[in-house]
Amino acid sequence: MSFADKINSEFELAEKNISSEHILAHIRKDAFTSFQKLGIPSNRHEEWRYTNIKTQLPESLSITGHTTWNLAKDGFNSFAGIKATKLVFLNGVLNTGLSTIIEETGVTVGSLKEHLSHNKGLTEKYFGKLVKKYEDHFSMLNTAFVNDGAFVHVKKGVTAKQPIFIINLYNSPENFTQSRNLIIVEDSSKLDVIVDFQNLGFSSYYNHVSECFVGNNADLNVTKLQTATQHTTAVHTLEAEVERDAKFTCTTISLEAKLIRNTTNVRLSGENSEARLNGLYYGTGTSLIDNHILVDHLVPNCQSNQLYKGILDEEATGVFNGKIFVKQDAQKTNAFQSSKAILLSDEASINSKPQLEIFADDVKCSHGAAIGQLSQDEVFYLRTRGIHEADAKSILTYAFASQIINTITIEALKVYLDNKLKERLHLDF
Amino acid sequence: MLSIKNLNVAINGQQILKDFNLEIKTGEVHAIMGPNGTGKSTLASTLAGKEAYEVLSGEVTFKGKDLLEMSPDERAREGVFLAFQYPVEIPGVSVTNFMKAAINAKRRHFGLDPMDAKDFLKLMRQKMELVEIKKEMMSRSLNEGFSGGEKKRNEIFQMAMLEPSLCILDETDSGLDIDALRIVANGINKLRTADRSFLVITHYQRLLNYIVPDVVHVMFGGKIVKSGGKELALELEEKGYDWIKDEVAAEA
Ligand SMILES: Nc1ncnc2c1ncn2[C@@H]1O[C@H](COP(=O)(O)OP(=O)(O)OP(=O)(O)O)[C@@H](O)[C@H]1O
Ligand SMILES: [Mg+2]
């Protein structure tokens, strides 16, 4: 049976288990119809040109298969040093025993599966509204098979005191796990979310989608951690809609991967809104890390800022595609993009492509892309103080990467990442 | 301490040092003066091991070892220190972290454990006082946005931290205001010991009022053309380089 046939029969089977009244019944069917037309993209597809995902997903993978898992409390990194509400998902399904919820008025967190059944008002309004319906292969697959994930809601005018930490753990090499987050931050509210991924098995495959709604004058700060994701083949899609006077920040830190694709799409749909998208990726071995970003300026007076840094060593590959769209109405747009990568070996490579499509005339847009090596003069300077060549290079690589880590506002998280980076670079200061 | 014999060095195919000879004994302070572009920094960089400088022929022995065989970092760990004429700015690396890495690299080289945090901070404080550097400086990125004078002070601070045997100072005085010059020179003087040698490159006699040299050399056209006592610096200050050039021309 081909992968496509297998997915078809899994979908049919899944359909039987869901009542036609369920809020998802239609959405899922539509999404699946879309997906059937789209299929899994090959590298002939422009958006997947440098990331041949099709060849990296074994045909034997099951979409609906779920491996149960008895995981001890100390069997994973629970980020003990960071105080937060922690939702722990095992192969895509919420595990309440491992989760810790710090109750806060106006903040609702829990299993998306449950909220889709019991919180229809909100989920009907928001679920599936941001994913690109007829074009995004993996969002459609994810929507068609949606099962569980995190549901986060912050009421109007509420500033959440604790961050919400969504910890996704994987251990099953047989499944292509579909998981989904729905994050709603209502008008004038504020929230920090950290989404972490850990592969605890031999290899893992997953397709993760987050939809983020940022209401008027609200502030949502999302940090995505791919720092324990060796042997991981994953597609991450994050869709955000940012309303008037609101601010959305997304920081994507990818330090380990077999193949990871991060698609980050932001719609600035309310005037005077702002998006900050920062990223750091560090590939070694034969890993491939792909960041596709789209900031869509739909209305006037908005700001966006993309700042990505990549380090590629050994035979690693990086892909950066940063799009800035400025629609005709979006006058007085201020959009900026910077992508810098350093190649630490001759076999490492990066495909970097800025893509600006500007239809308004009164805008400020700039982009810069730099690919290079470490500065010889800087390496020499450090060596003249007795520092070995390899260490000098590590120190300079650390300095390069620190700029992104330093943008992180949750102090304990910044310290964690700083140490993680030092560990990766074998630095002991 | 240092012995340079018939050293010929080229950069980008152009020969700069021509049969250069110099002998510095342990504990001595030598000054090198000479017109712009004559190869003073080339000498300093060659001794520090900068790759772009191609050694065509000649020998350099440092404490009895072949210096030219060593990598730049090995030279530093063995005790060669170059205070740069133009220190490089390194964004994102704090002075503190940088010094920790440098000190511990040297300690490991001599089979010692990394310095513990408390001792390290104490040492930092001590050496900062020596050249009157403010504490805030230590958490800033190395040389980034430092004023010309601050960069030079920072070089001497690093030198004090690393306690080298051979200190090469390339125009450490240029860019320093009058007070800073005195402070830095006093700092350097405190580092003068019987087992440490100095090679001081400068354009101005003023520095040599503070750091009194044992020998003054005049460099011209890639080699030393005249050597003398500290009075030679005064004479150069007074008369410029033309008379030296004439002397060289007459000999040729
Ligand atoms: N990368 C290079 N390529 C070609 N020529 C170079 C290079 N670097 C230095 N030179 C030349 O080598 C010569 C010696 O330069 P050097 O910096 O050693 O002079 P200096 O004596 O230190 O001068 P100053 O007093 O101005 O500092 C100069 O003519 C300079 O232009
Ligand atoms: Mg010079």
Image: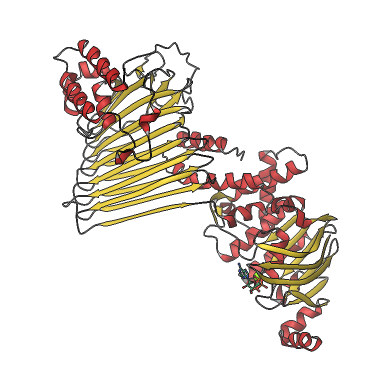
Residues A4 and A359: in front is A4
On the question of residue A148 being in view, the answer is yes
Seen in the picture, residue A137 relative to B194 is either above or below; the reply is above
Please state the horizontal and vertical placement of residue A127, each as a whole percent of the image. Answer: 21, 27
Please state the horizontal and vertical placement of residue A173, each as a whole percent of the image. Answer: 43, 19
Q: Quadrant of the C terminus of chain B?
A: bottom right
Residue A162, quarter of picture: top left
Please state the horizontal and vertical placement of residue A313, each as a whole percent of the image. Answer: 53, 41
Seen in the picture, residue A161 relative to A177 is either above or below; the reply is below
Residues A416 and A311: in front is A311
Seen in the picture, residue A241 relative to A67 is either above or below; the reply is below
Q: What is the count of numbered marks?
A: 0
Residue occupying the point 24% across, 48% down: A325
On the question of residue A107 being in view, the answer is no
Q: How is the image coloured?
A: secondary structure
Q: Is residue B46 left or right of residue A172?
A: right
Seen in the picture, residue B69 relative to B13 is either above or below; the reply is above
Residues A350 and A428: in front is A350
Q: Quadrant of the N terminus of chain B?
A: bottom right
Residue A207, quarter of picture: top left
Check the image and name the residue furthest to the left.
Answer: A21
Residue occupying the point 62% across, 57% down: B133
Please state the horizontal and vertical placement of residue B90, each as a whole percent of the image. Answer: 55, 54
Q: Is residue B181 left or right of residue A175?
A: right
Q: Is residue B33 left or right of residue B227?
A: left
Taking the image in four quarters, ligand 2 sits in the one at bottom right
